[in-house]
Amino acid sequence: MARINRLPPGLANQIAAGEVVERPAAAVKELVENALDAGAVRVAVTLELGGKRLIRVEDDGEGMTPADAEVAVERHATSKIENLEDLAAIATLGFRGEALPSIASVSHLRLRTRIRGASSGVEVAVDGGEPARATVAGLPVGTTVEVRDLFYNVPARRKFLKSDGAEAGHVSRTLTQIALAYPGVGFRVRSGPRTLFDYPPVAAFADRFFQIYGDRPGLVEVRKEAAGMRLSGLAAALAADGPVRGPQHLFVNRRAVKDRTILHAVNEAYSAATIKPRSPEVHLFLELPHDRVDVNVHPTKAEVRFLEQSLVHKVVRRGLADALGQEAVPEVTLSAPRGAPPVEPRVHAIPGIVAGMGAASRWGPVTEVFRRREGETGRGGAVRDRPAGAEGASVPHPSTEAGVPWDLVRPEGAAGAVPDSSETPGAADSTGGGPAPLIPLGQFRDTFIIAVDNDGVVIIDQHVAHERILYEQVTDRLTRGSLESQRLLEPLLIALPDGARDALAAHAEDLVRLGFEVEPFGGDSVRVAAVPALMGRAECESAVRAMAEDLEGLDQGAVVGDAIGRIAASTACHAAVKANDRLTMEKMTWLLQELRRTAYSTVCPHGRPVLLRLTRQELEKRFERT
Ligand SMILES: Nc1ncnc2c1ncn2[C@@H]1O[C@H](COP(=O)(O)OP(=O)(O)OP(=O)(O)O)[C@@H](O)[C@H]1O
Ligand SMILES: [Mg+2]
């Protein structure tokens, strides 16, 4: 006896519909994508009962002929692809010819359309997937699709819908995302008597972003072109209390997607830059040739597959790295009073350092002035109204106040925790390519390195800079395995409170990866038998204490990655050269070279600035040389 039945077409369609439209927001997405594919400049969406009773999508796109309109509601009917080759390079949002028939099989659907140049339009009606009925109608150019009583004939599906408000919320989020990708299109959304949003067409993404989110400081611009791809958008800036959390909108060729490769790259970029990387807000647009991405891999077209996945990963990671690291080196302005007694120069210009240097510098844009308020380490101006041009900039900074002596001292062969450049593998190649190197002139109070490049004078916090370098080395090595460990000749005993000891015990494995060997030693003590190779014995105790405290304060359920990130930051902090350490010229040069190779040279893992810049323009202005 045969056990296999052929399903009647109506039922087959309903099952297919279940994949394409699972809730009103999905139907809205499909209808709006059709409007965009039809070249609409204005799209209006109306909802009743969160879309359960009515979804209406009106567009002013190219419309359809009556014959096409009747075919459009049939399965596998599409104007967007013709053959297999087309499928390999899809440039439209739709391509399957599934959306309209799927929606029509689970609702009462009315499609009204008039193509440009035709004297009248047509209305096509489909009820629960029953054959379409077409009637002539007088209509404006464009298309209106009305979907009534979604899932009226699929009670199982209807039961799973949420409240009207929740469904309207889904629609709103879906459309917000689409609106971000199509600034040139106006979107108006009404839910019952309320207008959820109304964004007229605008020229650029920044304008659309402003319509949706208003002025948003705390985000930096992302812009990268490489390997035939273009990455653009906005991302949360690094800040003292962590990058702002928020939606993570990803678009591939303007299609909103969920993509693990991109998200992974985003997370990696932030993990390398900060110890507080969790869910930073990003709005990222990746554009690449259509034949390098497969969009036909997911029932709701919400996922894509890249031909060169690792290349995409790299471009996104580097793009973010640049954006996070390069934005807004805080600039300082001088406030020397006119007529002050001349200051005897203690450091003379080194001949040849100004001539012949590339203008491009990662140490900060030359023309932009960013204002840094006291205690604020978040960078990047507001998305709009970012101050540009150096005019009118006067940011007082405590260390530059008149009367503070610029006590530059050339250090002599003092010991420090920075290795000699000859011992550093890879240091030799660090001078080639990339931004112009910073040339150290000396130290100020054994704490700040004063350096110059073609764009001005730069003051570097030596501890923070070294911390930044070590942090990247540590996280880099950790992603490849574990840190090198060194056994202590004489184990260290440290007395710690209960909580701190428990925290260390709970993270024993993470500690081993980092090169620490810490075990309980009876009573209130722990025994430290090994520490990361990059750490000196003098720092061990304070590092272990700080780590224990840090781990103890970790949120309950915090992920291991967080713990590792914190320990890495803490390890780097303790191993780094300190303030008041005198450095040789060689060590300063090494530090600046290494800093230049880090992806995020402008802030430390805790968000503190690594360097301040005094621009050439500012100097020239002050010395009345302009
Ligand atoms: N708003 C519209 N304006 C003009 N033509 C439309 C509109 N909506 C649908 N069409 C036409 O109807 C066809 C079928 O639409 P449908 O959404 O079912 O499939 P698709 O967009 O081709 O592919 P997909 O199933 O991936 O969305 C489209 O290919 C298009 O030619
Ligand atoms: Mg479609």
Image (cartoon, rainbow, N blue to C red):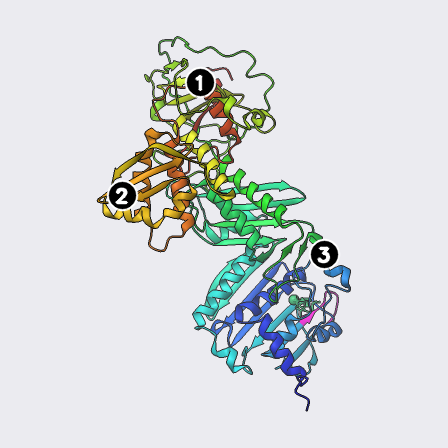
Q: Quadrant of residue 238?
A: top left
Q: Is residue 420 left or right of residue 403?
A: right
**First in sequence: mark 3 or mark 1?**
3
Question: How many C-alpha atoms fall within 10 Å of the one at disc 2: few (<14), some, or many (≥20)?
Answer: few
Per the image, is 312 magenta? no
Q: Position of residue 598 (x, y in %)?
A: 51, 33
Magenta segment boundaries in residue numbering: 113-121
Alpha carbon separation for disc pair 3 and 1: 57 Å
How far apart, in angstroms, are the residues tagged by discs 1 and 2? 62 Å
Q: Amino acid at mark 1?
A: Arg
Question: Which quadrant of the figure has residue 116?
Answer: bottom right
Tell me the amino acid under the disc marked 2: Phe
Ligand 2 rendered quadrant: bottom right
Which residue is the extreme one toward the bottom?
1
Residue nearest the viewer, comparing 100 with 601: 601
SS at badge 3: loop
Q: Is residue 557 left or right of residue 189?
A: left
The N terminus lies in which quarter of the figure?
A: bottom right
Question: Circle 1 — which element?
Answer: helix
Q: Please tell me which residue is depicted at 52% across the width and 40% down the height of the picture.
A: 321
Q: CA distance from mark 2 to mark 3?
A: 64 Å
Q: Which residue is mark 3?
A: 89
Query: Which residue has dot 2 on it?
Result: 521
* Image quadrant in which you'd find residue 178: bottom right
Location of mark 1 (residue): 622
Q: Position of residue 34 (x, y in %)?
A: 64, 65
